Amino acid sequence: MMRSLPVFVGLRYASAKRGGMLVAFLSRISVAGLVLGVAMLVTVLSVMNGFEKELQTRILNLVPHTMVVSSEPIREWQTLRDVIAQHPDIVNTAPFISLDALLSAGRHVEAIKVHSVNPELERSLTSIDSYVVEGEFLTLAGDNKAMALSAEIAARLQVSLGDKVRLIVPSNHHSGANLRPAIASFTVAALFHTGTTIDQELAIIPLGAGQKLLGVGDAVQGVRAQTKDVFRSREISWDIIQQLPPGYYARDWRQLHGNLFQAIQMSRRLVTLMIFMVIAVALFNVVSSLVMVVTDKREDIAILKTMGAGTREILKIFLIHGVIIAVVGTGLGVLLGCLLSISLPDLVATLESAIGFQFLKTSVYPVDYIPSDLRLSDVVVIACSAIVMSVLATVYPAYRASKVQPANALRWH
């Protein structure tokens, strides 16, 4: 009987609705705090995972993983492209010209980044064409006066599909003694929306148009490439440069977007630490509520001891009580956190639609929506950590209960 006594009494204490109002209130608060802490941690980690996943699957699919460039126009770029493509970890390559320019329409002017590319090769290098919302990306292949423009920039310039825009390239981009800027007119042939920071600055024109603006004939600035493993791009770039003559250098995605990846990682660690502190505060409530339960049940403990229950049985009773609180609080927290993680993107989108306000904008954040990626490994780690911390928090109240002296507890009863 004594073997089943701790389980029986621990379950009764955990499920009992009677007792002091203060004790009952503190017990509910302790469980609620644990539920909220665990739910917040699961939800926030899912959002951070979502940002990290979007960086890898969306942003890094829209930018080259690495590029080989030179300070001088590269005329034998086809040979360079062949050398790069021979590396076993290179997937696709394409020549490019990159320009910092001004884009004007009417009285509106925007500073932009222009990529001059071969449209057909660009489709194999990046997934930009899959984000075209109006027009056709391949229109650029047959028209040197066509431009694919971010819908965000188009809205700021107040232009739409088929409108004319003027591109102004500063003189320091092109060779020769002529210091006048290069100016050309383009027709907006495609509008794209990626939902990322790329929307704030990017316009795409055919490779021939960029070569004409720079006056470099058939030369290009460099060759861009996609790698099999995006996180080995720096190592792969170094291998390629070693095979090339002096004058070439490489730039990988970390130099362009590495700060974004590091910011996400740092935010994930800091937010995780802060919410673990919230769980720790909730566990202090667990300790205080269990101490109050011990105080409230001193007579019961004394009676159990006089009936033959030993110190170990009393210790087990309150450890079981604490474990039940830990499992129930953590279980409800995990369930709530999973539900929030799954529904959060839709909830935020619905709220934004209802109030007419966008919470995230690509001018500040990497994407303009709330991403979420719920991972089982995170849920398991959070649940196990919360339960272990909760069980450790019950040790002191359980130890204190086991030391109650029957004579002192029943003296004034």
Image (spheres, grey):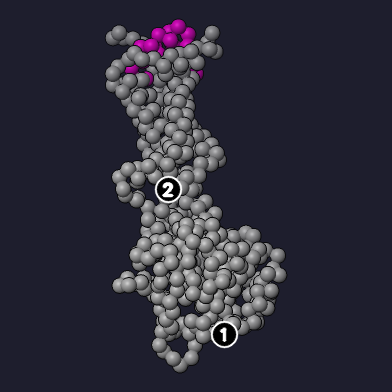
Badge number at residue 217:
1
Tally the marks. 2
What's the magenta bit mostly, secondary-structure-wise? Answer: helix
Q: Position of residue 255 (x, y in %)?
A: 50, 67
Q: Residues within 10 Å of mark 2 (few under 14, many from 20)?
A: some
- Residue at 44% x, 21% y is 321
Residue type marked 2: Ile
Q: Which residue in the rendered view is the most extreme toward the front?
A: 162
The residue labelled by disc 2 is 370
| Quarter of image, res 404 | top left
Horizontal side of 292 relative to 172 (left or right) equals left
Viewer-nearest residue: 95 or 16? 95
Up/down of 311 relative to 177, above or below: above
Q: Quadrant of the N terminus?
A: top right
Q: Quadrant of the C terminus?
A: top left
Give the alpha-carbon distance from disc 1 to disc 2, as whole Å: 45 Å
Q: Which residues are magenta?
A: 294-315
Residue type marked 1: Gly
Is residue 311 in view? no
The mark nearer the N terminus, 1 or 2, is: 1
Q: SS of the residue at dot 2?
A: loop
User: Mark 1 or 2, which is nearer the eye?
Assistant: 1
- Residue at 65% x, 74% y is 81
| Quarter of image, res 344 | top left
Q: SS of the residue at dot 1?
A: loop
- Residue at 39% x, 61% y is 152
